[in-house]
Amino acid sequence: MSLKSEAEPVQSPADFERLLQVAMSDDGGGEADPSAEQVPLLLLVDDKPELLQSLSELVRAHGYRVVEALGGRAAIDALGKQSFDVVLLDLIMPELSGHDVLEFAARKGINAKFVVVSGDTSFAGARDALTRGAFDFVKKPYEAAELLAALEKALRHRELEQRNVHMENRLLMSEQLHRFIVNSSPDLVYILDRNGCFSFLNDRIETLLGYRKEELVGRHYSELVHEEDLDAARNLFNERRTGGRAAQNTELRLRSRRARSTERPFQSQFVWMDLTAQGVYSDHTERTRANFRGTYGTARDISERKEAEQVINFQAYHDLLTHLPNRALLRDRLSLAIAQAARNKRRLAVMFLDLDRFKIVNDTLGHTMGDRLLKAVSNRLQGCLRKGDTLSRFGGDEFTLLLPEVRTRDDVVVIAEKILDKLAAPFVIDGHELFVGASIGVAMYPEAGDSVESLIQSADIAMYHVKGRGKNGYQFFAEEMNSKFSTRLSLERELRNALTSGELRVFYQPQVSLDDGHIVGVEALVRWQHPRLGLIAPADFLSVAEETGLITQVDEWVQARAFQDIGEWRRVGLGNVRLSVNISAQQLEQDGFLERFFTAFVGSGMAPEQLKIEITENAIMKDIEVIVPKLREMRRRGLRIAIDDFGTGYSSLSYLQQFPISTLKIDRSFVGDIRADRSDASIINAIVAMAKGLKLDLIAEGVETRTQLNYLKSQGCKEVQGFIFSRAIPAPELMGLLRNNPFAGVLRGEPAVVASAI
Ligand code: C2E
Ligand code: MG
Ligand code: MG
């Protein structure tokens, strides 16, 4: 076989396989192992047949195999055909001499041993033969013993030479094999000298970290190690590692020069490696500092595993949709923040934030839109944060915000208002304009709780109060919120009881014509006369009523009661007033709703146009297919339908046109925005224009000030409802107002008569 020289390194797997086969076979890859027992083959050359004959007999007698060549030509022929161990060569021959044969053998690289057997005893002849490659010289006539001794010497020599070549070959192959293994290793293999400088690196360094080997040889390992991992590296290399400890693995980040993919966010210019190190000593029995020579070891790329770990870690502590911290991480950070606040005698705030109209978007436009909206909301919220604040997604449309650095409530108010302000602008997603407000509950440490659980719960309770009070706003947790009902469950139980034991009341709030101050209608509003807690406003119990489905019973009861009251007022000549009742989506959705409702209504003896149903946009949107046909039927039978809290919902103008409605009721939040110092009442202007365009009646609720009253009047709003005239009051008080109609004076500028109650 032909061996590869150093200049021709092993490169391909095929090369490697061949080397491996050679290394694992016993015969050195075809090079005959000279130690194998074999009878030597000799070539005898002489031009004298009788001399050839006697020489042949002599060596045969000693057990050698023999080929005879009569003359130089025959010798060259034989040498060309096969290889011999020793050639016994006559020098002086006609035609081709022994010298010619030697020359031929040298030229052809024939490696048999040549022993010249010649009668030419001249010094020049012998020298000539030896310089042409003859091994030994035996003078003719020879003595048998002398000839045999020369022959044996030549054979022994040849054998030694062959052994040598064979061993060299094997060494060379072994060296190449190991070099190949080291260089094609998936791991980095390195050697450090006693000072910690690289003295060897395998080829892997180039693909792994992007350095050429030559650049690093002589450089200190610390130049490659991430500064945060230097201690670990020092530990790994400086501790004189041997034996069991040597195998220990250490995970480090090494500086890489290779450009890393931008798609993998966790990858930096550092690569995570798992390193092993083994100390090398000049004397292995004495592993002392003086004996220490350096370190060798391997380094494996574990960046993929590390990245996977980071992703898993991220997933465990983050919400995958918004990438915000999740509940678990929030709890973690909150408990840390509480500990810090306690130590420094500082305060902190937890905000619980629930989106107001998210469910409608999700239900009507689908989850994909819902998800996109959540992402957009989370982006806007993040814009409101300061360094150190933690915004987390608690689940669904709930977010929590931890503000560890607040001193006063005012600090929190600024942030809450900023958030509400940011969320007020519509989100435009896929061509839809989506409006979401937020209800924010705030709990301050330590007054609203001193543990993770109690703070989150307090913020949650405060948030529910905002929801109950018309949403889109914020409230701080107050002890009373807790004291009314210890749990939502107890509220539910007591509300069920209230329905059967007659604790509910209906109060009425007048609706006043701006033309002449006449009470043109009344809105029936439920109250709960709680035996222990006193009079409770609907904000405090309607959300639970809705969640539990009790709302239908509440609605039916309120309506029945109001119809009854109207009947009584009629008997005293006050029964012409228009009645507005609020109706929930759940009541409308019920099977058999229309029959039941109209049975009750007909029993009241009212004219159809005397009754107005108030329903919010959101309630309609909850179940358009079921609710709109029912509203249409009510409208067909002559009832009026008002969209309550108009402007806060998510319906578009095109939807509105399909609804069988007669009145828009401007939400009190817009009315509240009308202030002397603020001329920006563009939403009201828009609603007024819309009502005109769609030929709908208009009423504004929540009017408290004369400025608001005048502004609404100037815009062409015909009816209003609000504290400026009266709060919602019990039926007997209302009868007094109906009788006296005292509001004309208010319109003329006289002081407002504000009736009592809530
Ligand atoms: P709503 O239907 O929009 O009723 C108007 C609310 O605004 C009433 O609150 C009323 O007291 C309040 N309000 C009226 N004028 C003013 C004002 O000038 N300033 C302020 N700040 N508030 C004013 P209330 O009675 O607490 O009712 C809250 C909500 O509860 C109602 O809002 C309605 O959505 C719901 N609700 C009340 N009674 C019933 C009912 O019998 N059935 C159903 N389904 N919902 C009801
Ligand atoms: Mg209403
Ligand atoms: Mg309203």
Image: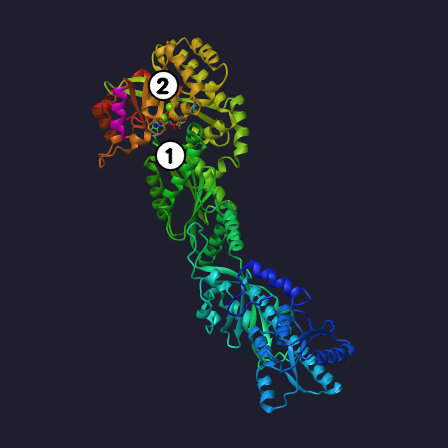
Kind of element beneath mark 2: loop
Q: Relative to 417, does residue 287 appear above or below in the rendering?
A: below
Which numbered disc flags the more N-terminal residue, 1 or 2? 1
- Identify the disc placed on residue 606: none
Kind of element beneath mark 1: loop
Q: Relative to 533, does residue 385 appear above or below in the rendering?
A: below
Residue 664, given in percent of the width and then of the height, sits at: 32, 22
Residue 584 magenta-highlighted: no
Q: What residue does disc 2 label?
A: 659
> Which stretch is magenta?
683-693
Amino acid type, label 2: Phe
Quadrant of ligand 1: it is top left
The quadrant of the rendering that contains the N terminus is: bottom right
Q: What residue does disc 1 label?
A: 436
Residue 311, given in percent of the width and then of the height, sits at: 50, 50
How many numbered badges does the structure rendering display? 2
